[in-house]
Amino acid sequence: MAETPAPVRAVEPITRPFDAEVALPGSKSYSNRALLVAALARGRSEITQALWSDDTRYMHRALEALGVRVRADEAARAFEVEGVDGRFPAAEATLQIGNAGTAARFLTAAVALGQGTFVVDGSPAMRKRPIQPLLDGLRALGVDAESREGTGCPPVVVRAKGITGGRARMRGDISSQYFSAILLAAPYARHDVEIEVEGELVSAPYITMTLSTMEAFGVRAEREGDRRFRVPAGQRYEARAYPVEPDASAASYFFAAAAVTGSRVVVPRLGRTSAQGDLGLVDVLARMGCEVTVGLDTITVRGPDRLRAIDADFTRMGDVATTLMAIAPFADGPVTVRGIAQTHFEESDRPVAAATELRRMGLRVESTWDSVTIHPGTPQPTDVQTYDDHRIAMSFAVTGLRAPGIRIVNPACVSKTFPEYFDVLRGLTTD
């Protein structure tokens, strides 16, 4: 019996420059941090302007499985969370979190605060994503946590008796989420928690986002650069109203769309006070010839006649590396995207996936473990394989705004973080 072909979505090229203001969904990173912190807090919190997507749905349903009362209002993009004051009511639970890496890492640490046996599991892709450094860090803090199959990946079993505290040392070159996971749970440990970074810390701005969320809910943490973090014991989160700012990773596709079509885009509610590291892409686009204005609460990008070549480091903003790769063929020389080793372990092996699809478009691409160089050229009509990775789908849809014949296979994978993406993209040229 023949397999049913995967659905595809054609991307319509833009025939004239656009001038648009784009309202974007709430930040996934802030939404999931706020959901977890509100669940651990004392009192009732309201999270507004939140992201409504697969990733936040997995988080809020997992919290419900742990005994947290969550009222979700999809129309209002809001969650009302009744906090449990540091300890989940459930004595056992199996949490299915799909391929939501944030939920998997954060919940693995958070369930350790309870009393009982908890399993954190996910999709086949999630079962290939490493979590061993986090498990090692938790063990150093007195937690009984292990990879059930011995693979260093989910499913994870946590036999919870609370977090003792102390000092943990974790490698920093795979994911900053390991550090965020422990930091978010640390206020409820019996003793102070100190985390030391081994090697380079990738995606460090996400740690800043974690600490700012903790502070917003009343917890103080200490930081020594990107080397050491400490959370004094005896603190607790206090409930509050928490508005979520737009997602900088989602914004990247519209900044790139303007850059590659000589257009202008304005994104409101994001500006110079944001801690989201992925906004660093606008600095890269400015170096490539874009006119960029970063205000207090708006960012405007206007594309040039032609983008300039660049060699850019994405160590601190790996989620938007594929955004630049997708528009790199339209530059006036080679574009090198480096500092991306950690993105081999995302929803897909992103450097390999992106390089593969660019080559299928007929482009010359050179790859190392930590970098991809794309030479200028004209992308040929291609059905882009997305590897069930939302960022591959959204990035190469931007390629299709400039190159005819680009179709996205399995476009529904964008529901992980931005279900309305293709509608918003199409709206750029709707009069």
Image: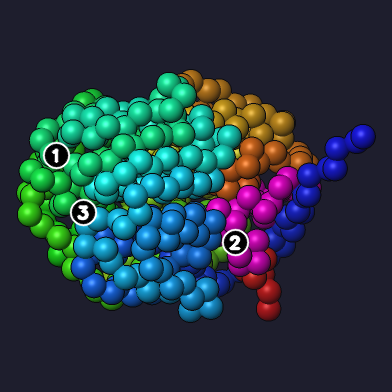
Question: Can residue 23 be seen at all in this image of the molecule?
Answer: yes
Amino acid, disc 3: Leu
User: Is residue 395 visible in this depiction of the protein?
Assistant: no
Q: Does the magenta stretch include residue 277?
A: no
Identify the residue at the far right of this view.
1
Residue linked to disc 2: 419
**Where residue 261 sits: x, y (%)?**
60, 57
Element carrying mark 1: loop
- Horizontal side, residue 29 vs residue 98: left or right: left
Gap between marks 1 and 3, in whole Å?
21 Å
> 232 or 367, which lies in front?
232
Region rendered in magenta:
397-424
119 vs 421, left or right, is left
Amino acid residing under circle 2: Pro
Q: The N terminus appears in which quarter of the rendering? A: top right
Instruction: Please state the horizontal and vertical placement of residue 308, each as a whole percent of the image.
Output: 49, 43
Q: Tell me which label, 1 or 3, sits earlier in the chain.
A: 1
Residue at image x 71%, y 35%?
361
Query: Dot 3: within a 10 Å radius of its alpha carbon, few (fewer than 14), some, or many (20 or more) residues?
Result: many
Nearer to us in this view, 347 or 117: 117
Q: Give neighbour class at mark 1: few <14, some 14-19, many 20+ (Cα, 10 Å).
A: many
Q: Which colour scheme is used?
A: rainbow
> Which percent across, then down, holds residue 147?
40, 28
Helix or strand or loop: what does disc 2 sit on? Answer: loop
Q: Which residue is drawn at 17% across and 34% down?
A: 141
- Above/below status of 241 relative to 337: below
Which one is in front in this view, the residue at disc 1 or the one at disc 2?
1
Secondary structure at numbered mark 3 = helix
Q: Report the side of 142 relative to 248 (left or right).
A: left
For residue 164, the mark is: 1
**Residue identified by numbered label 3:** 211
- Residue at x 50% of width, y 65% of height: 52
